[in-house]
Image (cartoon, rainbow, N blue to C red):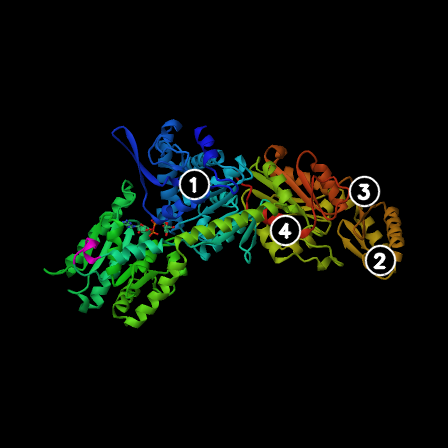
Amino acid sequence: MGARSASKNIRGEGSGQLVVVSNRLPFISEKRKGRMQFKRSPGGLVAALDPALSRRGGVWVGWPGAETEDPASAAEMVPPVRSSDRVRYRAVPLSRREVAGYYGAFSNRTLWPLFHYFLARTEIDSGSWEVYERVNERFAEATAEESTPADLVWIQDYQLMRMARYLRRMAPNRRVAFFLHIPFPSYDVFRILPWARHLMRGLLSCDLVGCQSQEHADHMMSCSEQLLGATVDRGQGVVYFEGRPTAIQAHPIGIDFELFQRLGEKSVPASSGVAGPVEILSVDRLDYTKGILARLRAIETFFDKYPEYRRKTVFVQLCVPSRTSVEEYQQLKREVDEAVGRINGRFSDPGWSPIRYLVRSVNQRELVALYRRARVGLINPLRDGMNLVAKEYVAAQLEGRGVLILSEMAGAAEEMKEAVLVNPYDVDEVASAIRRALVMPEAERRSRMLALRHRVKVGNVQSWVRRFVESAEAASAIGAKARVESPTDVVRRKLLPWLSKRPTAVLFFDYDGTLTPIVTRPEQAVLSTNARRLLRRAMRTPNLDVAIVSGRALDDVRRMIGIPGLTYVGNHGFEIEGPGIDFQHEALGAYESAVEAASRELRQIKVEGVWVERKGATVTVHVREVAEKDRRSVEKRAEAILARHKLTPTTGKRIVEGRPPIDWNKGYAVLHVLAMRHGVDWISKVRALYVGDDVTDEDAFRSLRGMGKSIRVGPATHTEADLTLPNPEAVVDLLGWLASGAFDVDRV
Ligand code: GDG
């Protein structure tokens, strides 16, 4: 296609180009007199990315802003490429329905409110989720076409959280980074989304995921762990999932400091478009996350509590209309109008009104003039990814006399510690902070502002782009090297497509040597707290059914695990107990006296270290502690005694076991559990997975051949199992992944 061949002219030699992907392309297009006209979108992000794109050569992929399903007419909505251009644009055409579902609904009525902790406003609608998925896939297709493995793909924001997953599938070698401009919520909030795991997988398909603050990065790491069972290295800020590392880092965005400073220098009070004094200033998009109503309550409280400021102080609230077609935003506008009217009605007198309320966008020159004049910048959103207004206010404070009051809930608060920090929900605190700012001694104001200005200058948007791109390149280089899978990753990758073809998985775990390391004496084989927690979690996961299968007596294994409600298989399958199952092999009674007599005789073997364990229907001779030289002869004597009593001797890891000569073993028991729990046609309903380490587990591996899957734990020996894991730690790792329900629903 045209764009692709054009890219050859544009692409710089040597290093790859930068491919920026965002919901909107960075310009507004309009047809005038039959010709398309393009106007650059305002804003620091576009201004900072433009030079980076031109320097390296690059492509910007995005939606051009007008609804169309036709790729040809979408291609007309981007500026034409001349051969000298180093940046070009690729339009992703979206229909009216797609824009409504992906942007209007899922992005703005599901992700936006949830990520800002407005749970009651969060819509959960699978229809819009499906559109979001499809549109993300379309962005990935366009990006795959526009890029090569040498390029760096940089995806912007919450509208495109699934895109990297698709891009990886279409173009596995792309270097991919993502930046989230809005907050990332805590696990307890994020998990509310039925598609939380899907979104997490989308993020973990990147080499680098950047966010505004360390708090958001921490939330991403714990969600990776809890939702997907991924391995997290918090010290390094890396998550390992499906054999690849993803760096998760805070990259607080900045502003074009020089620009705001320059505009500040040029500004004159009259250019602000607001006459009279401006003591307190707030500037926001008209959005419920910005906390305008709570702020107005704080202003009212301020005038109530400190009447000496009436007739003197003016609060200017500039609201830029936003998402005006959405009913909720229209409602918010009515509420803000009403609150302003009421407060002004209460306090105004003929010469003075406490609130100057402007609902419109002003140009940047006017905005900076306002910033410069304001004695107090009141920036107290209820929740905000960063909040650039706070930084812009600081940059425009050339005299350094202003005071910034900043919400603790804004990402900016993590860096801007010299501001007066407030809880925006606490109207009394905000009212007192305003008063404190107005009476703050000049020396204190200056020293706070000086420090803030220094930070904002150093962390400007240009350095943000530079650092992010450098980190993304470093992360993708490490990722390419580290793409060596751990044994658990290999097993996970092989199991995933198989497991996800059935709604339920039945997991069978042997105990000793599988869930716990092999120890000298059975009572020392204690289950770790982590393994117990994960088993509990697996039990509560709706699509998992968990059974423990052991050679130990049933009572013993139940006690060692200590989780009521699981299925327990004891004595190599002779005894089974669990929800809906209470089983004892019928032939057991007939051999009870033989087992008893054999046990008595075995106890007569008086060799140091021999230890006989009677386990109901079976008897075990432990020889682990017997001196090496005597071990074999003890085993032989034990086998002879068992044979004399017509019991079948089996030799395992440093044990000899006598069992009734009944054709019954762990393998039959597993099939019995499956039939009892899920019906004789279980094979069409569930997936069965058996994990064990011993020869006796081989019976289970054999019975599941072709019907289920099995994993042998321990050093590679001859085994009938389909897969292997090196040790119990790897089993617990796998259990973590299974217990997280990670293979549920989503097949990708
Ligand atoms: C998202 C995140 C994060 C406002 N009024 C006028 C005007 N503005 C400009 C400001 C500022 C921008 O709009 C608003 O940026 P914020 O950061 O405050 O908020 P969001 O739009 O919600 O942005 C946010 C940001 O992404 C970047 O990562 O900080 O947390 O929610 O630049 O100057 N500009 C002009 N006239 C106005 O009337 N010219």
Q: CA distance from mark 4 to mark 3?
A: 34 Å
The N terminus sits in image quarter: top left
Q: CA distance from mark 1 to mark 4?
A: 39 Å
Q: CA distance from mark 2 to mark 3?
A: 21 Å
Residue 661 badge: 3
Residues marked 1 and 2 touching at CB (< 8 Å): no
- Percent position (x, y) of residue 94? 38, 33
Figure quadrant of residue 490 = top right
The residue tagged 1 is: 21
N-terminal of the two: label 4 or label 2? Answer: 2
Q: Determine crowd level at label 4: few under 14, some 14-19, many 20+ residues with C-alpha closer than 10 A.
A: many
Q: Secondary structure at mark 2?
A: loop
Residues marked 4 and 2 touching at CB (< 8 Å): no
Figure quadrant of residue 699 = top right
The residue tagged 2 is: 603
Q: Secondary structure at mark 3?
A: loop
The residue type indicated by label 3 comes to: Pro
- Percent position (x, y) of residue 65? 34, 36
- Percent position (x, y) of residue 414? 41, 60
Residue 732 badge: 4
The residue lying furthest to the left in this view is 350
The residue type indicated by label 1 comes to: Val
1 vs 2, front mark: 1
4 vs 2, front mark: 4
